[in-house]
Amino acid sequence: MKKIAVIDVGSNSVRLMLVADGKILYKTLEITRLGEGLASFGELQPAAIDRSAKAVASFYARAKSDGAEIVCAFATAAVRSASNGQAFLSAVRSLCGLEVEVISGEQEAEIGVLGALRGADGGIIDIGGASTEIIVQQSGEILYKKSVDVGVVRLHDLCGREVEGLTDYCGSAVNAFGQVPHATLHAIGGTATSLASIALRLKEYSSSAVTGYALTMPALVGAIEYLKTTSPEQVAMETCVPQKRAEVLLGGAVWLKILLESLQLKEVIVSDADNLEGYAIKKGLL
């Protein structure tokens, strides 16, 4: 079997996907919060660079050990928007020799919709650690795509877990998306899958359970109330959401609620398939 691996260097987590002959063998992640402090300082912090680069090198070694003939990696908002993004790329190169491709916000939107919808009509909302992408396609053509520098790590750095502050900030930021064509939207990324997991009361994460799940406005409001009144440690004990994810999830929930209100949508369809698959497809590896 020909095996390939894709590493996604996000602003909150580093993820690894291993594929053999077009079949996904596994996905795994490590939350390293590369984008921590970026909203305040405009650059990646040394500790964040160190732990994220080490995670990439560890995943590279694991992929090779598991038989991957090709290992490719891409980085998103934290690296592309930081004044010292090259420092992270150099750190990865020195640890394992891997060249990480830095993609634009529009490219991130394109691979996200490719991975989730595979050419079908509709669109995606991808709430990441340092940016959010919305893209809509119809009959094979992209009608709309935009990336805005709002994500869960940025929100946590700027507003913490204060719902009022988060609501005010997100309420202003949502205007940057302008007029988005009406479409059935799918939500991808860790924020969406974690909120679906909470709504479904999953103790153990299940890709099949969250994929296709309709996250309604009432369920989203319920998740916000739960996250607002429950400590991240308790969330991790009661659900499959890791504590480090739970620490930043409230901002993502508030942001998604405001996005849906702005788009006049009553629900969004969650998908576990996302830009990892999209990047592999774009590269002709899946």
Image: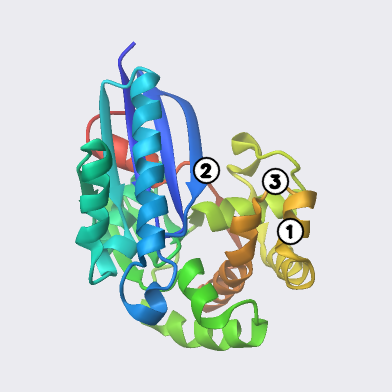
Based on the displayed image, in which of its 4 quarters is residue 266 positioned?
bottom right
Compute the Cα span from label 2 to label 1.
Answer: 24 Å
Residue 244, percent from left and from top: 60, 57
From the viewer's perspective, is 279 left or right of 259? left
Q: Along the line of sight, which residue is nearer the eye, 234 or 223?
A: 234
Specify which label sits upstream in the sequence, 3 or 2.
3
Compute the Cα span from label 3 to label 2.
Answer: 15 Å
Check if mark 3's residue and mark 2's residue have beta carbons within 8 Å: no
Quarter of the figure that contains the N terminus: top left
Q: Along the line of sight, which residue is nearer the eye, 156 or 26?
A: 156
The residue that appears at 49% across and 57% down in the rendered structure is 184
Residue 276, percent from left and from top: 38, 41
- Whether residue 244 appears in this view of the structure is yes
Q: Where 230 sits versus 22, above or below?
A: below
Residue 230, percent from left and from top: 78, 66
**Which residue is identified by label 1?**
233
The residue that appears at 42% across and 73% down in the rendered structure is 37
Check if mark 1's residue and mark 3's residue have beta carbons within 8 Å: no
Q: Amino acid at mark 3?
A: Cys
Q: Where 271 sits versus 234, above or below?
A: above
Q: Amino acid at mark 1?
A: Glu
Residue 188, percent from left and from top: 49, 52
**Which residue is identified by label 2?**
272
> Counting other residues with Cα less than 10 Å from the Cα at mark 3, is it few (<14), some (14-19), or many (20 or more)?
some
* Element type at mark 2: loop
**Which residue is identified by label 3?**
240
The residue that appears at 40% across and 19% down in the rendered structure is 66
Based on the displayed image, in which of its 4 quarters is residue 280 positioned?
top left
